[in-house]
Amino acid sequence: MKRFLCMALSVLIMCGTAVLFASCEKNYDGEINVFNWGEYISVGDDGGRNVIQEFEDEFNIKVNYMEYETNEELYNLLKSSNSNYDVVIPSDYMIEKLIDEKLIQKLDYSKIPNSKKIMKRFQNMSFDPKNEYTVPYTWNVTGLVYNKTMVKTAPKGWSALWDKDLKGKMLMFSNSRDAYAIAMQLCGITPDTFTKADVDKATEKLKEQKPLLKKYVMDQTFNEMERDQSAMAPYYAGDIYTMTTNNDSLVGVLPEEGSNLFVDAMCIPKSAQNVDGALKFINFMTRPEISAANMDSVTYASPVEGAKELMDEEVASSELVYPPESYLDKCYTFKNVDDEVYTYMQEKFIEIMS
């Protein structure tokens, strides 16, 4: 509040009167609407770079930046007839769905020369096998975080989340896809895609776990673990790294079975109003120095060649942020599944949690 008032007073003083306030606003050559995950970009906090401001200054294009919490929220908004987003950053399986339903458009890569800097591992991925619709933005894996003052034996894999000695002290994903993926792995099912029969097997495994849990959560994991309120939880490894830096009692683990290797990528919706501005934004975000700034902020890994070397050394050297190649070889990436099967999984998970 104080910061806003000081800025407002400064503008009024510079302009002389409130009547002239509007004339002090910058005139842009255009604008783009960017829709991204919450807290998923560097905006200058803690001494970092404000990459949105840098883009606006360089290209004289105003960025209207908005946030969403889930892939499904993004999907529902893109299905709306009055959606007006120029750049969106969904996850792998949702990208495949958006392509199938013709909700995003093919990209003109001649206007995204930095796309050539994308690492080979993140090219021709299953959700965009011909590299026609996307430019990867971040990647990371799921992992485990535990409190070494509350857990006697360090966990090695996902089965630790079924430890009866930790009854009432463990958390679980409230995200059905992530929760079922863990259960499926323990049932010997590769969770990239699945059937109703696979859902049934995993449902029984999750039912076994429920009496042992404290609760199902997502972002609440930060408070629960950092404040020593819970003993163990699954979460995204880059976020686990952040938790460990905020509480010395916390330890991050990459489960020995492997885990979900997720990729979020930049796309342009079919309904975009400023495609040229969107292409400029995507190319800008794929500059190594800009990607490095973003990854330092969100503590996920960059798919851009040369970005890791520009990141904060402590962040870039963590295996939670950049798991070794040998570990990635054990991981899987989510694929889109049939709507009927996905809905069935959602319904079963609601039954478990209720």
Image (cartoon, rainbow, N blue to C red):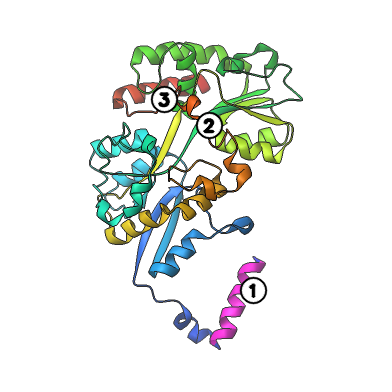
Give the vertical position of 278 relative to 6 (above or below). above
Give the vertical position of 350 relative to 313 (above or below). above
State the predominant SS element of the stretch in magenta: helix
**Visible residue check, residue 209:** yes
Q: Position of residue 35 (x, y in %)?
A: 40, 51
In magenta segment, residue 235: no
**Mark 3 crowd level (few <14, some 14–19, many ≥20, 10 Å Cα):** some
In this picture, residue 147 sits left or right of residue 340: right
In this view, the residue in front, 335 or 280, is 280
In this picture, residue 104 sits left or right of residue 117: left
Specify the amino acid type for callout 1.
Cys
| Disc nearer the start of the sequence (2/1) | 1
Specify the amino acid type for callout 3.
Tyr
**Mark 1 crowd level (few <14, some 14–19, many ≥20, 10 Å Cα):** few
- State the residue at coordinates (49%, 86%): 19
**In 3D space, how far apart are the residues under numbered discs 3 and 1 (Cα atoms)?**
50 Å
Q: Which residue is mark 3?
A: 332
In this view, the residue in front, 70 or 286, is 286
From this viewpoint, which residue is outermost toward the right? 149
Q: Which residue is mark 2?
A: 323
Q: Which residue is mark 1?
A: 6
**Disc number lying in front (2 or 3):** 2
- State the residue at coordinates (40%, 57%): 284
| Magenta-highlighted residues | 2-15
- State the residue at coordinates (44%, 57%): 65
**In 3D space, how far apart are the residues under numbered discs 2 and 1 (Cα atoms)?**
44 Å
